[in-house]
Amino acid sequence: MRALRARWPSAEFTVLCHRPEQSRQILAGVNVETALQHDDDTTAVRRFYEQADLVISTPGGFLHEHDDISAALRGFGVALNLGKPLVLFARSLGPFSRSNNRGLVADLLQRASIVAVRDDLSLRHLLDCGVTGQHVICVPDVAFLWRRLHSDLFVAKTGSPRRAALCFRKWPHNDREEFRRTVAKARGLVEHAASRGIEEFLFVSTCQGIPNYVDDSELSVRIVDGLHPSLRDRCVVDRQRHHPEELIRLLSTRDVMFSMRLHGSLLAMLGGTPAMGLAYESKTPEIFRHMGLKKYQVPFTSFQTRWCDCASGLLEDLDHVRATLPDTLDRMSAGVHQALERLDAIAAGSRLYI
């Protein structure tokens, strides 16, 4: 919204989401209303779509079948049936294995004005559904917009790495055995990093500090509690919520980042801190590849030795990654801004955006 407002100063935004009361507390000054639920009558939200000149489905990884995507698809249908331009921007989506979803995706997204995905795998998933055309494009993650919006947050690093940030999450949600393995490997990674000269460990996440929402800091506490006391004393678990700008600033004080959360990695790099990704979905290897950094990520399900080998590789290449990071961030940021230019023609004369 900040980048769009810079392009369209007169724009008005309405955000539809599933927890409006909570979101209003977090997003001060933003008009937030209740989004369409999967079994809702569309009457309640129809008026927002009727008032809109442009409907943007927000960035992220929300259109895949381990979530219920029926509400999102119904919302797309409402917008399109009202003749509103529909834009999906910087999304990861698919695969779509259920025949009813494949049919809806094919129909709705073929009719969208722009479908901008953030990875090549999502492009293949669209193609599998029969969605093709010049309106389908690949763009970098919108987090890279911070590179221009707040370039002063980047802090160049020199010297040997001493301070690390770490971000872990529970995944899959109900797999206790995988959770146990993640905790054990996270402790092993801390021990390995300490053996490579890391002296301080900050545990912090993009998802924490919000009541009744996912709180990765609970996992961080469990990881730290199981460490040897000599290592535990060198760890800090930050349990507060941080606005993206605040989190970039915090992560800029670290020398290296090890993160399961993709945006933990990206915000760290926007602060000048090289990051290693522990991928739990395809978005991490895809986006790291686009950045030319694929060798610095591994599947989180990998053996402990592979986690540690990847961490060692990043620490050994740290000077090179530091030197190339500014140009990489500039390139990724330019890619998002070029995609936003595609919206200008659609949005000409518009006043209200959802």
Image: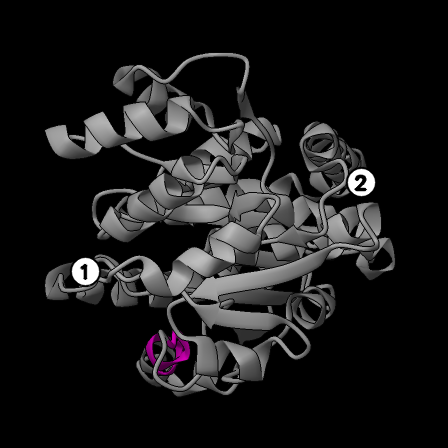
Q: Is residue 243 left or right of residue 311?
A: right
Measured in 3D between alpha carbons, the distance from the residue under mark 1 to the one under mark 2, in whole angstroms, is: 46 Å
The number of numbered discs placed on residues in the rendered structure image is 2
Structural crowding at the residue carrying mark 2, measured as other residues with C-alpha within 10 Å and reported as few (<14), some (14–19) or many (≥20): some
Residue, disc 1: 39
Residue 305 shows in this picture = no
| Coordinates of residue 137 in the picture (x, y in percent) | 54, 22
- The quadrant in which the N terminus is found is bottom right
Residue 174 shows in this picture = yes
> Which residue range is magenta in the image?
215-221
Is the magenta region chiefly helix, strand or loop? Answer: helix
Q: Quadrant of residue 273?
A: bottom right
Q: In the image, what residue type sits under mark 1?
A: Asp
279 within the magenta span: no
Q: Quadrant of residue 253?
A: bottom right
Q: Quadrant of residue 24?
A: bottom right
Q: Is residue 104 above or below residue 11?
A: above
Q: Secondary structure at mark 1?
A: loop
Q: In the image, what residue type sits under mark 2?
A: Pro
Query: What residue is at 60 percent from the left and 71 percent from the top?
Result: 31
Query: What residue is at 74 percent from the left and 57 percent from the top?
Result: 2
Residue, disc 2: 326
